[in-house]
Image (cartoon, rainbow, N blue to C red):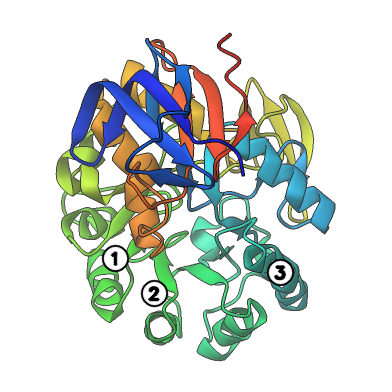
């Protein structure tokens, strides 16, 4: 057994607020309430200690995809762990139904082993009008029987399905997902305000990357954005990379939804953590230039190259959001949505020792997952 470890002297973000000159005690894989006299003390004065990040929506990174073989999936997981994401849901992209079912089987094994927090199916049940970086010829209406096929293939590890709920079968599919404890997310949709309200009433609880791949907010036809922001039952995903959202849109979401209903996501693709070049997103080719991913054909934005440590720094230093609100959006809120807040999402005794160490400029210096350093701070 490793000796108990005490991280001392940092500003620690707890559910109750920021503690100056705080301590986090790590005993094995968990956070402990007290430390023995012989505990190892690591001085992290001048740093922040925050909970490990929880990403609900992520397609890959490190040059690898969650649509690839197991070695690729593990490579993408490791890439995002090094950037502070200690809990990660693997997102698929629109593809042939048989392929998605097979991939769900592969991903479910990794979820059962604890490497992933589950599976998110983004497509193929989305609108061709708002397809973004999804292959139009593979799109289909959300037939509940086909939605059920993917849920069954995931062997209890399906966490979320993104739907254009206005399509035939959409509302029935939302009800099916709710009955099976799977999050129904409204996204890649051309729905009206009224259709979106109906989907929420049927059980939809997440807005997939709010503002993106849906009609713009209008003063006569408010569309899905207004419905999703207004309803307290809905958590809104936001991609805070400076490309997907104008800062005013981010501010609007926080103002209307409140910090407790926002989840920062990456929507990352293969290039996250790597750099510019040509990549594949499902069956489509993507060009990444200056960190922005776009389809080679058509030029649509194709996911992001974001990592959650960068989303954190941008939110605090550019968007000027309170650190506590950013921690909620990156950790507590998505953990609660996934039903994992008894284990992750906050620094409390009994929970997994998942944490991120940041310096005064909010640059990442250390990552711990279940009591082991993924990125050793090497503070000397």
Tell me which residue sits at (39%, 54%) in the image: 335
From the image, tell me which residue sits under label 3.
109
Q: Position of residue 90 (x, y in %)?
A: 61, 56
Say left or right for 274 vs 265.
Answer: right
Q: Is residue 168 visible?
A: yes
Mark sitting earlier along the chain (2/1)? 2
Residue 124, above or below 357: below
Marks 3 and 1, how far apart at CA = 38 Å
Label 3 with label 1: CB-CB less than 8 Å: no
Confirm whether residue 285 shows in the render. Answer: no
Q: Image point 60% across, 69% down: which residue?
A: 124
Which residue does the numbered mark 1 point to in the structure image?
192
Query: Closer to us: mark 3 or mark 1?
Result: 3
First in sequence, mark 3 or 1: give its number. Answer: 3
Residue 235 is situated, as x and y percent measured from the top left of the image, at: 30, 56
Q: Earlier in the sequence, mark 3 or mark 2?
A: 3
Q: Which residue is mark 2?
A: 166
Tell me whether circle 2 and circle 1 mark residues in contact (CB < 8 Å). yes
Q: Describe residue 182's horizontal placement relative to residue 150 as left or right.
A: left
Could you tell me how far apart the alpha carbons at marks 3 and 2 are, in whole angstroms?
A: 33 Å
Question: What's the distance in space between the residues labelled 2 and 1, CA to CA?
Answer: 8 Å
Helix, strand or loop for disc 3: helix
Kind of element beneath mark 1: loop
């Amino acid at each position: 057994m490793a000796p108990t470890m005490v991280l001392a002297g940092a500003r620690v973000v707890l559910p109750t607020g920021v503690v100056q000159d705080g301590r986090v005690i790590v005993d094995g894989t968990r956070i402990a309430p007290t430390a023995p006299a012989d505990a190892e003390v690591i001085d992290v004065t001048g740093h922040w200690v925050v909970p490990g990040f929880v990403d609900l929506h992520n397609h890959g990174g490190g040059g690898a995809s969650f649509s690839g073989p197991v070695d690729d999936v593990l490579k993408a997981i490791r890439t995002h762990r090094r950037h502070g994401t200690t809990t990660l849901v693997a997102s698929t992209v629109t593809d042939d139904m048989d392929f998605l079912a097979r991939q769900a089987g592969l991903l479910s094994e990794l979820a059962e082993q604890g490497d992933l927090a589950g599976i998110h199916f983004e497509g193929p049940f989305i609108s061709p009008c708002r397809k973004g970086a999804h292959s139009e010829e593979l799109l289909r209406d959300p037939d509940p029987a086909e939605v059920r096929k993917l849920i069954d293939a995931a062997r209890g590890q399906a966490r979320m399905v993104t739907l254009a709920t206005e399509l035939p079968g959409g509302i029935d599919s939302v009800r099916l997902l709710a009955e099976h404890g799977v999050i129904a997310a409204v996204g890649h949709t051309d729905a009206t305000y009224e259709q979106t309200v109906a989907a929420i009433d049927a059980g939809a609880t997440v807005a997939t990357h709010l503002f993106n791949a849906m009609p713009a907010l209008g003063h006569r036809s408010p569309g899905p954005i207004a419905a999703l922001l207004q309803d307290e039952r809905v958590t809104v995903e936001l991609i805070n990379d400076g490309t997907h959202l104008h800062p005013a849109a981010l501010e609007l979401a926080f103002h209307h939804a409140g910090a407790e209903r926002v989840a920062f996501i990456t929507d990352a693709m293969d290039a996250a953590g790597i750099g510019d070049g040509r990549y594949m997103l499902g069956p489509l080719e993507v060009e990444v230039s200056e960190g922005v991913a776009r389809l080679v054909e058509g030029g649509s934005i194709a996911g992001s190259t974001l990592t959650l440590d960068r989303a954190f720094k941008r939110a605090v230093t550019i968007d000027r959001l309170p650190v506590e609100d950013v921690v909620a959006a990156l950790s507590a809120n998505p953990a609660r949505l996934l039903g994992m807040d008894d284990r992750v999402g906050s620094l409390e005794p009994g929970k997994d020792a998942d944490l991120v160490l940041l310096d005064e400029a909010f640059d990442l210096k250390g990552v711990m997952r279940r009591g082991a350093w993924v990125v050793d701070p090497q503070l000397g």
